[in-house]
Image (spheres, rainbow, N blue to C red):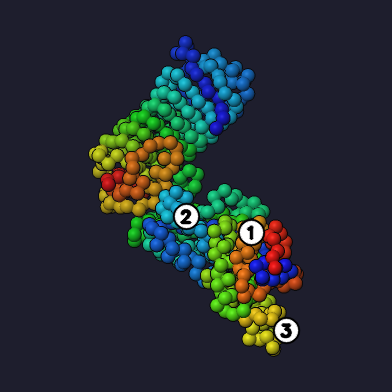
Amino acid sequence: MLLHGTVIEDEFAEAFRMWASRLVVTAVDASWVGIAARQVCGYGTSVIGCDAEVGLEHMLEPAQTPDGRPGAAVLLFAFKAESLSKAIVNRTGQCLMTCPTTAVYDGMPDVIEDDDMARIDLGKTLRFFGDGHQRSKVVAGRRYWRVPVMDGEFVVEETVGAVKAIGGGNLLVSGKDQQVTLTAAGRAVAAMAPLPDVVTPFPGGIARSGSKVGSRYKGMFASTNDQYCPTLRSVSDTRLPDGVGCVYEIVVNGLSEQAITAALRAGIESACGNNIVSVSAGNYGGNLGKFHFKLHKVMQGSVPTA
Amino acid sequence: MSGYTLTYKGHAPVGLADGAALRPDLLGELDRKSLERAVGEHFDIAGDQGNCLTVRNLPVLSRLGAQMQRGMLVVEGNVGTDLGASMAGGLIRVIGSAGDRVGGPDRGCDRGMTGGEIVVQGDGGDYAGLVQAAGLIVIGGKAGRSPGYRMLAGTIVICRGPLDQPGLEMRRGTVICIDRQTQMALGPGFSENGTFDQLQVVRLVLRRVVALGVNIENGAMGGRFVHYSGDRFELNKGELLQWVC
């Protein structure tokens, strides 16, 4: 399939079952919201080495937040609800409670406990920082903990919802050189950014160190994806088409297959163009991940052009 | 929200001892025939089954919404004492004023309301929130003596002052006054902590108050509040907040 002169390869992105939560973070102004969001998203690229995969979903207007202040919706992903719980409590405690003026609310208030959904204790755990001075307040059926801190109070919701989600949707954007490929990948991330229920957790939404499963070294679960490294073209079983000097990966985590499909499609449509040789996707032969996003199927409805 | 509307016929003023039976969770779920058997002697009935019960043209009755569990009770007109006594859930909205002990304890109960929300658009009587254990009370006008007296937990919002010894002997809970001009006569067990803006709990509560249809003065939402702790003769974990600017 061709789009704007770029080949869309007949490949699929292999993605995995994960658990996700949405935190709504508010602060006194948009600047502090941005600082808080950056902090909580830090060191949250891949569960290969991080406790969670974390990204900014979107910024929120004051009218969209529980306390009427500017805010941000942040999505956090982990393989199990238990590990997600630990990551959320640690990140909220260390990155958000410490950040001036913030408050943290549940971005999935309608989630109730069942096989596909869970409630994670957040304020219920963090309240003990108050050393007996903490207080709770129930407003409209939701319990908030108020932890006294040196700029007033840190308000945090007692529990947050968690749902089964999907991690590891991805695109591989291959171009003539680094500059043109980075620009194209940036266009793809920008096209995905406004879409709901998805995040791209890598730096700027883009990963350069795409990985394969396993390594020749003991204890390494993942190692560089040598088939896509341009400097190994002549020494590895390369999968790079002729004329490709650079590949960037965009990893998309989302709350549903529909959300990831929409994001992949928006990303492909934006990435394709001059000097972008191909758009492909990473997979492991289909044996590891439950979800297969076939690029041609993702693009159904898009008119192929020469 | 669907439900029945009951209009009091007014020809049998002694027919109702109190309003405790006028609850959406008791009457709203009855079919029309059963409802007519239950209250048709005193009320004209309109509407359908549902979780909202509206009552009109009532004499001033006590114990309306007492021990209510769920649903929404709308009272058009003034009500008597013990509105929402020991209620556990749901919403009571009074389009008028209320008597003493809004959200207080019902007969035989040692706690006031344990959940739910009460909105009195007019004035409230004395001791609103007496031994209140949870939930939200909003008094759109003035409150009488000591709102939050012996309060255990929960929230009271009072839109107009003056306030006479709010929260006296409270253990926990919050009384918020959003009348900037008013005077607040404090009990001896309260101490001022200072004036604060950006108290998110105030924002959360006041946004809920607005969502319940109560008009609050512009600026209160993000305003500065004086914060008092008390009552130190009890647990000293209660708080009074008054909007100042």
Q: Which residue is rendered at x = 66% and y = 86% of the image?
A: A232
Which callout, 1 or 2, points at the residue further toward the start of the chain? 2
Q: CA distance from mark 2 to mark 3?
A: 46 Å
Protein chain holding label 3: A
- Above or below B180: residue A163: below
- Percent of width and height locating residue A101: 38, 59
For label 3, the SS is loop
Quadrant the C terminus of chain A occupies: bottom right
Give residue A296's quadrant in the image: bottom right
Q: Residues within 10 Å of mark 3 (few under 14, many from 20)?
A: few
Q: Which residue is rendered at x = 34% and y = 30% of the image?
A: B123
Labels 1 and 2 in the same subunit: yes
Q: CA distance from mark 3 to mark 1?
A: 32 Å
Q: Residues within 10 Å of mark 2 (few under 14, many from 20)?
A: some
For label 1, the SS is helix
Q: Which residue is rendered at x = 57% and y = 62% of the image?
A: A192
Q: Which residue is rendered at x = 59% and y = 17% of the image?
A: B36
**In the rendering, which numbered label is found on residue A262?**
1
Which callout, 2 or 3, points at the residue further toward the start of the chain? 2
Which callout, 3 or 1, points at the residue further toward the start of the chain? 3
- Percent of width and height locating residue B3: 56, 27
Q: Residues within 10 Å of mark 1 (few under 14, many from 20)?
A: some
